[in-house]
Image (cartoon, rainbow, N blue to C red):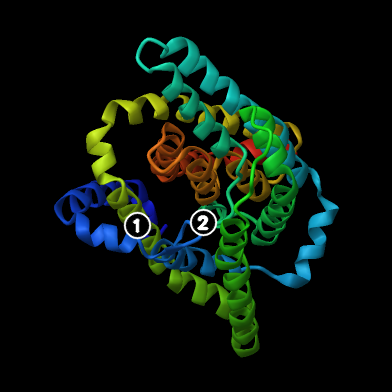
Amino acid sequence: MPFFERYLSVWVGLAIIAGVGLGLAVPPLFQAVAAFEYAHVNLAVAVFIWVMVYPMMIQIDFTAIKKVGQNPRGLLLTLVINWLIKPFTMAALGWLFFKVLFAGWVDPQTATEYIAGMILLGVAPCTAMVFVWSHLTKGDANYTLVQVSVNDIIMVFAFAPIAALLLGVSDITVPWDTLLLSVVLYVVLPLIAGFLTRQMLVAKGGEAKVESFVGALKPISVMGLLATVVLLFGFQAETILAKPMAIVLIAIPLLIQTYGIFVIAYWAARRLRLKHNVAGPACLIGTSNFFELAVAVAISLFGLHSGAALATVVGVLVEVPVMLTLVAIVNRTPHWFEESNE
């Protein structure tokens, strides 16, 4: 395993510390970078995510995508977790913690806003970072692309109704500019670039050339991940310092939700006898979130400085460290799926 990947959790921890430290030391710099956005999509973060996703896209073999239909169980698992389980467990946990367990520490209005932010995270399955988690777990690139694409299509139709149902709001306006720009930046453009790169590499040296090129890009991809972490924590450094207790309170149910959903999905994947390179990404898609969309909707419904917006931001902050622990679990348990496929 490459040096960067072997100690990735250490580098991410250092990136978190660096992000918070730099965000407090030079806030004008991070404010300027944070302002470089369109439709709630930060373009600097988009560039770094693009760097992370691009190697994964080169690995996609379009001639093999049709084979995904021969094994629909992984896709079915992702869809059930994302749309029939995750939003409702998130709402239930939010209510349990902020209306019951933490009721004495948070006023009712703020508690309601925290729950709303958690629900918005739960209804927005991840689009971009999934490719990174799949890449780190040696997932089937073709299968992952199909899973993400189908989820994005369903999200267009299901996000607003489910969010409206769980929030008790009659009308949810989907920020189409955020949704469409994110899909174009994180999926369509790197997919086109990856396809063209793959065609060129195959013409020059076949699959061996593709593998060699992707291997050379891995350190750059990891650096893109670390730079993203620095920016995300730098953007929120002052909030982390100003509201540490609120962040801890919100993080607790989010952590329980993330690990709980993963356990359910991973157990189901083993029972469904999925291959490990399909099971890993399928479960990780179900546990990560499309935070740009959640943040945009929280701000439009409740305001920039609302508890809902803060809850979605906490979702952003816990995403990378938590997902890396799940990646480690997936990478240590391929034998579970070898046994189940015997």
Tell which residue pokes out farthest to the right in this image: 70
210 shown above or below 273: below
**Residue labelled with disc 1:** 226
Q: Is residue 141 left or right of residue 109?
A: right
Does residue 246 appear to the left or right of 161 in the view shown?
left
Image quarter in which the C terminus is found = top right
Which residue does the image show at 45% across and 22% down from the upper left? 109
Q: Residues within 10 Å of mark 2 (few under 14, many from 20)?
A: many
Splitting the image into 4 quarters, where does residue 33 fall?
bottom left
199 shown above or below 95: below
Estimate the x, y position of residue 288 in percent, counting from the top left. 54, 43
Image quarter (top left, top right, bottom left or bottom right) of the N terminus: bottom left
Task: Tell which of 306 and 228 is nearer to you.
Answer: 306
Whether the residues at callouts 1 and 2 have beta carbons within 8 Å, the answer is no
In this view, the residue in front, 61 or 183, is: 183
Q: What separation in Å lies between label 1 and label 2 (alpha carbons)?
A: 12 Å
Estimate the x, y position of residue 312 in percent, counting from the top left. 46, 39
Q: Mark 2 — residue?
A: 132
Earlier residue among tags 1 and 2: 2
Q: Is residue 91 visible?
A: yes
Q: Residues within 10 Å of mark 1 (few under 14, many from 20)?
A: many
Label 1 sits on what residue type? Leu
